[in-house]
Amino acid sequence: MSLSPSALTRRSLLKTTAIGLVMGVSLPVPLFARSAEPPPLADYKPEYFTAQEWAFVMAATARLIPSDGTGPGALETRVPVFIDRQLAGAYGIAADWYMEGPFDPAANPQLGFQSPLTPAEIYRQGIALFDGWCRQALGSPFAALAPVRQDQALKLLEKNALAAGKPPAGATPAEAGPLVPPELRDFFTLLLANTKEGYFADPKYGGNHAMQAWVYIGFPGARASYAEWATRQNVRYPLGPVSISGERA
Amino acid sequence: MARQAQKKDVVIIGLGWTGSILGIELAKEGLEILALERGPDRKTVPDFRYPDVADELKYGVRNGFMQRPRDSTVTVRRNLSETALPYRVLGSFLPGNGVGGAGVHWNGQTWRPQAVEYRLRSYVEERFGAGIIPEGMLLQDWGVTAEELEPYLTRFEYVLGISGKAGNLNGQIIEGGNPFEPSRSKEFPLPPLPDTYDSVLFAEVAKSMGYHPFPRPSANASAAYVNEYGMQLGPCNYCGFCERFGCLNYSKASPQTCVLDALKRKPNFEYRVNAEVLRIEKAGDGKTATGITYFDADAGEEIFQPADLVILCAYSLHNVHLLLLSEIGTPYDPATGTGVVGRSYAYQMTGGTSLFFKDKVFNPFVGTGSGGVTIDDFSISQIDFAKEGFIGGSYITAGHTGGRPIQQLSLPPGTPAWGRAWKEAAGTWYGHAMSIGAHGSNMAYRDTCLDLDPTYRDRHGRPLMRMTFDWKPNDIRMTQFMKAKIEPIAKALKPDVMSSSYKTDSSHYDVRPYQTTHNVGGAIMGIDPKSSVVNRYLQSWDLHNLFVMGASAFPQNTQYNPTGAVGGLAYWAVEAIRKDYLPNPRPLL
């Protein structure tokens, strides 16, 4: 089997790999230049999150970008590591944001972010509130719920519709509850945005492990040089991604 | 107490496009010049170099080249009775920061306003009658004409090495260019950029419908180029990291690539960074500026810098802020309609339609900042305002700037925001979408304005500037008109799915999603000191040795991206300073 450079498209690569596995042989050519494998996600020591928060972030990102179906999920791409590092850094402390009072966190959302809390504080208080609600309303912390219940809970959080109090037996948790205070109303928005950032950002930030998300959608990463491709119509670009640190896939 | 520095002939506030141009042109006069830039120094190397700049998270999402709201921001309210709140996190607009200003991270779309846009009130009154002007709309002429500005717009385009195709050369309409543009005296300095697949599809269908597609004028060089200052550009490599990024390839025109290295070689020019001007100081007679006071962040001290000539070259919003803080000119009062500083703030009305094709591959990451194809068939000069019920116009355009997956992934309507369906849609549709957009005018109104906020303060203890702005029925009718023109074009391309996003009657200004960094007005030019802050040479009506550059001079926004007119006005103003003002300093009108 020979592999010309033009055969190194995502689809052909996946197909070749699958055939290789089925036939019990390995690829004849090393196609990847990668940095050393990081420790398994389960062994990662969070810089910002507590153990309970980390369990939530692992479980929640796994529902926001699940592993089933086509394409890698948040856990294979190490999105939780990305979020942990972002919150431990300048983003977490809102280093660039205007954070002077007075604050009106209940203002019209079109006037933008108005919480007095930094992203790191919003995660800390938001996870405590949401996990507490899950225990009270659904009987377990979020991470221990079945995926179907996790999705139901996230949909309520997305609408900031967690209701205080325990719902009647057998009922789905009621919508339109006042449990989420205005200063935490952006919690889900941040969680989802940061999850997608971690999925698609350069691997140097800890997520998008091995550029799997780029390979999956067909984005060549930091190649940034395509002059001769400007005028090629309806032809798929043949090369896989490179990262800022020089990884190839 | 501020330390007093040795006097300079000229002090320039802000070292972006206009500061660089004023600097190099006034340096030719042998004047001693100091430029003060509030942000850090920025150079192609190391700040924009490959591969570090190809970082969507750092520069695209976290806005690494932009103004930090912590250091400088505005408050926003949508009407005069709402309580304005700080623009705490960047969203709707992205002012630049540091040497090069927004000229570092712009796309490079370099347009000339249409001739009627410089004299919009006169045009409307002559053609349609003053009766069509809606209550509260502050329509105003610029005080300068397309013919007067033409040589200066040409000069700016030749400094930047703009790629494009003339459509009206000395009054002669040229096939393949924009037939609705004002007459230009020279062909573009560089030929148009090659068209990507989406642009080709749009051009073909637009032409078949009787429209006049032409290549969008672009500050991304299509070939090697050397400008009048000896600065060199190389051809764009379609890297897909243009807007929000500095150019890694010496291809996008910026102060760095087109002016600054030449300017820095002038022995009579000096610049300082991390030097934020706090106020412009006035002489006792109130007729001139004596200099400026700035905060030197490196030394941690305030410095009074005396100068004979003060050129305000900050971003448009900061120009207005500094005038208000320095108490130069009468602040505008929307209750009475009197005063001028902060009057006539305007923005940009945009909308668009996304098209999704299962069987078409666009390779969106193969992108240049301002390539693409445009039609101007529904531009401001081509619309019967009386018949259509609005004043304004848009250009309609296709072409993409990149395929960066965090910010530029376009999914069909109805796709869930998360979960397996989102993930699979990302895999299915990435690279299979294109868009057609409308980029349109925005008028100024009695209650769209800028003043000092009563509550919030910046890091120097100064009041933040307060922006009062919302979308108005006239401009919403305009963009709905464009929707009705774009959707048939989109349908003719037979996409599998399409979705439209245009402002409607229920739309209000939302500071969260990015729209444009085309904030204009507030220190507008004109022929009457009662309704303008600067005269037709951008000279302050109040202090004759103060000139104010930038889009703060626009009395209402044109339908185009502002940089072409900003650059043309800078060359126009600096010629008046050199030839008329310096020999005899005085009010020029």
Image (cartoon, coloured by chain):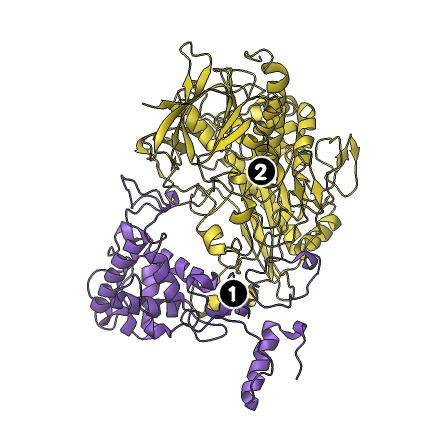
Chain colours: A purple, B yellow
Q: Quadrant of the N terminus of chain A?
A: bottom right
In the drawing, does residue A96 fall left or right of residue A184?
A: right
Q: In 3D space, how far apart are the residues under numbered discs 2 and 1 (Cα atoms)?
A: 37 Å
Q: Residue at x 48, y 39 (%)?
A: B98
According to the picture, the residue beneath numbered tag 1 turns out to be B426
Q: Chain of mark 2?
A: B
Q: Would you identify the image quadrant in which residue B176 lies?
A: top right
The total of numbered circles placed on residues is 2
Farthest residue, direction bottom = A24
- Please, what secondary structure does the residue beneath circle 2 have? helix
Amino acid identity at mark 1: Ala
Residue B204 location (% of width, % of height): 73, 52
Residue A243 location (% of width, % of height): 52, 63
According to the picture, the residue beneath numbered tag 2 turns out to be B255
**Circle 2 or circle 1, nearest the eye:** 2
Is disc 2 in the same subunit as disc 1? yes
Residue B562 location (% of width, % of height): 58, 35
